[in-house]
Image (cartoon, rainbow, N blue to C red):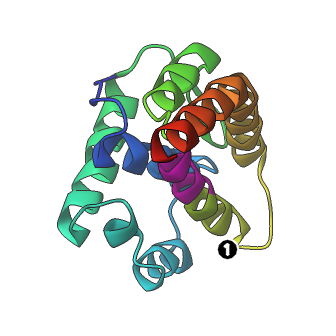
Amino acid sequence: MRHYPKNSPQAAARIVALALLADGHVCKRELQLLDQAGAHEQLGLTRQELHTVVQTFCEDLLIAAQLSWDTACRVDAATMAEMMAEVDDPALWSKVMHLCGEVIDSDGHVSDGESIVIRAASEHSQRQAPYWALHARESQAMAA
C-alpha cells in the first residue's frame, strides 16, 4: 500500500475511497454524492485528482496480500490504521469523516465492510483526541 504525506489531500481522499469501496462496489449514487458535495474541493483536489486517488487505491487493493475477499474487499486492521494515521489534522479529519458518513449513508444500508471502516475511524478519533485537545490549547495560546 502506498503512503502519502501526512495530512495531504491524497491521504484524506484515500480514506474517503476506503469508505466508498468498503461494501465491495461503487454505485453511481455515491459518486454523484461526492460530486454534489464538492468532495474534491473540500479535500484540496481537482475532480480528476480525486478519481486518480480512488483508482490508485483500487490498484493497491488488487495487489495487496493482506486482503481478504468475500462479499466485500476489506483492508486488514493494521493497514487501515496506518491509512487513517496519515490524517491527524482535526479540521481535515472532520471533513473526511463527514464525507465518509455521507458515502456510507447514501444507500440507506451499512454493510459489514462499512461498519469496519466506521469502527476504525472511531478508534482513530479516540486515539487522536488527546493530541487534538493539546493542539487546540496550543493554538489558542499562540492566538492570545
Seen at 46% across and 39% down, the residue is 142
Amino acid carrying label 1: it is: Ser
Residue 30 picture location, percent across and down = 53, 72
Seen at 22% across and 54% down, the residue is 52
Q: Is residue 128 magenta?
A: no
Q: Is residue 92 magenta?
A: yes
Residue 48 picture location, percent across and down = 19, 66
Visible in this render: residue 15?
yes
Mark 1 lies on residue: 106
Q: Nearer the viewer, residue 47 or 43?
A: 43
Q: Nearer the viewer, residue 52 or 63?
A: 52
Q: Is residue 113 above or below residue 69?
A: below
Indicate the secondary structure of the residue bearing disc 1. Answer: loop
Q: Is residue 116 left or right of residue 17?
A: right
Q: Is residue 37 left or right of residue 68?
A: left
Residue at the extreme bottom: 36
Q: Which residues are magenta?
A: 90-97
